Image (tube, rainbow, N blue to C red):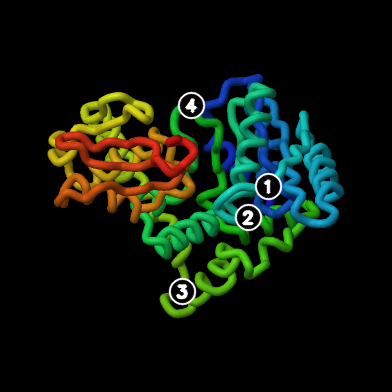
Amino acid sequence: MGPHPAVAAVRLAVRRSLADLDAGVLVLVAGSGGADSTALAAAAAFEARRGAWRVGGVTVDHGLQDGSAERAAAVADLLRSLGLDPVEIARVRVDGSGGPEAAARRARYAALDEAAARLSAVAVLLGHTRDDQAETVLLGLARGSGARSLSGMPGRAPAGGAYRRPLLGLDRETTRAACTAEGLAIWDDPHNTDPAYTRVRVRQRVLPVLERELGPGVASALARTADLLRDDADALDAWADRAYADCVTGDTAPNLALHVDRLVAVPAAVRRRVIHRAALRAGCPGTDLFASHVAAVDALVVEWRGQAWVDLPGGVRAHRRTDLLCFTAAPHHPRGK
């Protein structure tokens, strides 16, 4: 008798995601104790025996709840019981701009990056599912984001990146069913049901309304949209790479500038990507740089009527100087003094 269908589905997803790995390499699973990451860890441990690679685990203690240290220790014990080795607990401090969700995300990925580098892991597996993808797309729509944001989370990080998301083709019901079938205890993080968080409201209120009013399959449709937009965004980003190299003179503030005549020669979608890239290179934090900022700078290129400048996050100022679009440190900001 074969495994439960849900167990088989999760194992197959992991097998396909890691089919390119060589024997003996180390893969890390980011575990939270929830159904998604627990099903992923169990499947990775099973498939590791077939693929002859090693699988370890990392659980991140954000310190945001009472008893978080004990919870992290319990998750680590669970991962070890599944056969993962090594298993580590990464304790992080959550602070910085962008709200608690963004700050926790930055701290979590920094901890995973550090663990992967130190342990020489070739991949870090994340338990995001199709439902997470649908929520990501809806959040991007609500913010008025562009194609890159609406393309959601990639199943595999770009070249040089370690992150993989084997479960993007499966829903949460499947991962929960897999855990139940294997008798695995799971922990439901209370933050995942707290309506104070925007993503939780999308999960509990918005998506159910869409499914009820538009019919079933909305989450799957949103995930397919993300896949299609990712292909488009990848093509536009590659074009923007070439355009940036052609337009830029100097590549770090305060000497970064773009040739306006070359900027106006490319389509708007490419031009705005070039401007976004230049702003990041000049020191704008990516979490605070929005489409409205890029549009304001774009106006200095295509609608210039002598405007003085545009102040951007991170103390960066964009201004037009005849045929150059320049990015410098704003005088009132510590970087500009």
Q: Residue at x 61, y 49 (%)?
A: 103
Crowd tier of the residue under label 3, counting other residues whose Cα lies within 10 Å: few below 14, some 14–19, many 20 or above: some
Q: Is residue 47 above or below residue 231?
A: above
Helix, strand or loop for disc 3: helix
Locate the C terminus by quadrant. Answer: top left
Between the C-alphas of marks 3 and 2, the distance is 27 Å
Q: Residue at x 38, y 56 (%)?
A: 145
Q: Earlier in the sequence, mark 3 or mark 4?
A: 4
Residue 238: quarter of image: top left
In the picture of the structure, the residue carrying the numbered disc 2 is 100
Q: Residue at x 67, y 33 (%)?
A: 28
Amino acid residing under circle 3: Leu
Amino acid residing under circle 4: Gly
| Residue 160 marker | 4
Helix, strand or loop for disc 1: loop
Mark 3 in CB contact with mark 4 (< 8 angstroms): no
Q: Earlier in the sequence, mark 3 or mark 1?
A: 1
Helix, strand or loop for disc 4: loop
| Residue 94 marker | 1
Which marked residue is nearer to the observer: mark 4 or mark 2?
2
Crowd tier of the residue under label 4, counting other residues whose Cα lies within 10 Å: few below 14, some 14–19, many 20 or above: few
In the picture, measured across the screen, residue 301 lies left or right of residue 277, that is left
Between the C-alphas of marks 3 and 1, the distance is 33 Å
Find residue 198 and report its horizontal and vertical position in percent: 56, 65
Q: Is residue 130 above or below residue 30?
A: below
Q: Earlier in the sequence, mark 1 or mark 2?
A: 1
In the picture of the structure, the residue carrying the numbered disc 3 is 210
Find residue 122 and report its horizontal and vertical position in percent: 59, 26
